[in-house]
Image (cartoon, rainbow, N blue to C red):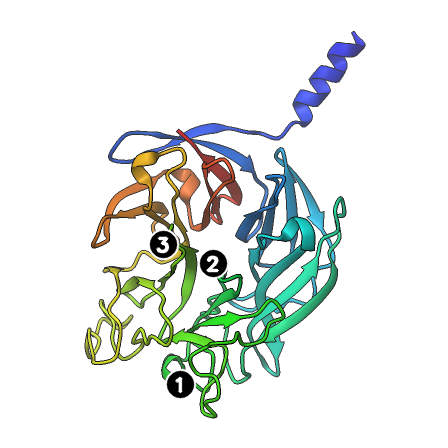
Amino acid sequence: MTFFRILITCLLMAPAATAQTLEGPNGPVPVTRMADGLTGPWSFGFLPDSTVIITEKQGRLWHVTDGQKVEIGGVGPIAEVGQGGLLDVLVPRDFAQSRQLYFSHAVTQGGSAGTALAVATLPEGADTLEDWRVIFQITEGSQGGRHFGSRLVEGSDGLIYMTVGDRGDRPSAQDLGRENGSVLRLTRDGAPAPGNPFAGDADAQEAIWSYGHRNPQGAALDLQGNLWVSEHGAKGGDEVNRVQKAANFGWPEISYGTHYSGEPFEATSKPGMEQPEFYWDPSIAPSGLMIYSGALWPEWEGDFFTGSLKFGFISRLSGDPIEEVERLEGPETERLRDIREGPDGAIWFLSEGQGALYRMAP
């Protein structure tokens, strides 16, 4: 009887890995819940052993192994204000050797907060970060709690690309003297990367790679190593953009859709300002961005996936020019915050609304 008591106890303690399906125009897609009980989850990343790191906006960090969550300590001071808090996590390609993790977060700046980048070390087998250091933060002067941006991508050049929103200050996205509304290109030490377009310009911040963005909350590399972002518009005009050196993406001078007041924008194009590769009108509030390898779904190779915070679905974009071709949705996609391809080619996504992490595989 002892064996059966142990077996029953193990089964009762095991995490619930519940299989469901997402509905799409091409039929149901199986989905499994991999972790739950999360509060305000914002991002996740895979360690080399395929276990998962998850951030919560309130400043908590989780390590998930076989559905079991262990909180990781050692997170530094976080300013949880409005949309700001502990946001993205980047697991660099050399993590197995360096043991370094990078975090975007909100940091207190005087009476307000700004977007910052921190690095810390997670020793093998440990459940506490060591040597948390803020290595970059945007220029002071932002107000309020909106539009921190905060996606992190390790570029094909080994540098760190970090998105920053306009912080609710629309004109600042056209001001090169501030990092608001931009994509930054940084070294692993948090310094402006060599070769940045505005290096040596006394009127510009040297970390800026591109500007004129509103609030990019999705960023990913395509299969050729090019950087793309998805970003929030106002009432309409959410965009997908291919990021290029020194490019001006126009916010708030140009945009599709309308202001929250219902008034149209002044223009949808101006000389010297980039057009989006795709836009939504009305807004879906896109968060997270993944460009798929085709590992498990060969027919989806090179397709873009982003989550909708507003309507609760996964949008799949495909083709040249890019078009939205499918929406996958179910209770599991409620306020979908982040989406990534796993080491095995499965598609994983994080639902803020459900407080859970899911895995989608054929």
In the rendered image, the quadrant that contains the C terminus is top left
Say which residue label 3 marks.
310
| CB within 8 Å, label 1 to label 3 | no
Q: Is mark 2 on a helix, strand or loop?
A: loop
For image coordinates 54% across by 82% down, the residue present is 139
Say which residue label 2 marks.
156
Relative to residue 160, is residue 32 depicted above or below? above
Where does the image place residue 266, in percent across and percent down from the top left? 20, 79
Say which residue label 1 marks.
175
Q: Is mark 1 on a helix, strand or loop?
A: loop
| Left or right of 200, for residue 63 | right
For image coordinates 24% across by 69% down, the residue present is 275
Could you say which disc has been placed on residue 267 in the image? none
| Left or right of 120, for residue 170 | left
Question: For the residues carrying marks 1 and 3, which lies nearer the camera in this image?
Answer: 1
Q: Find residue 246 and report its image quarter.
A: bottom left
CA separation, marks 1 and 2? Answer: 28 Å
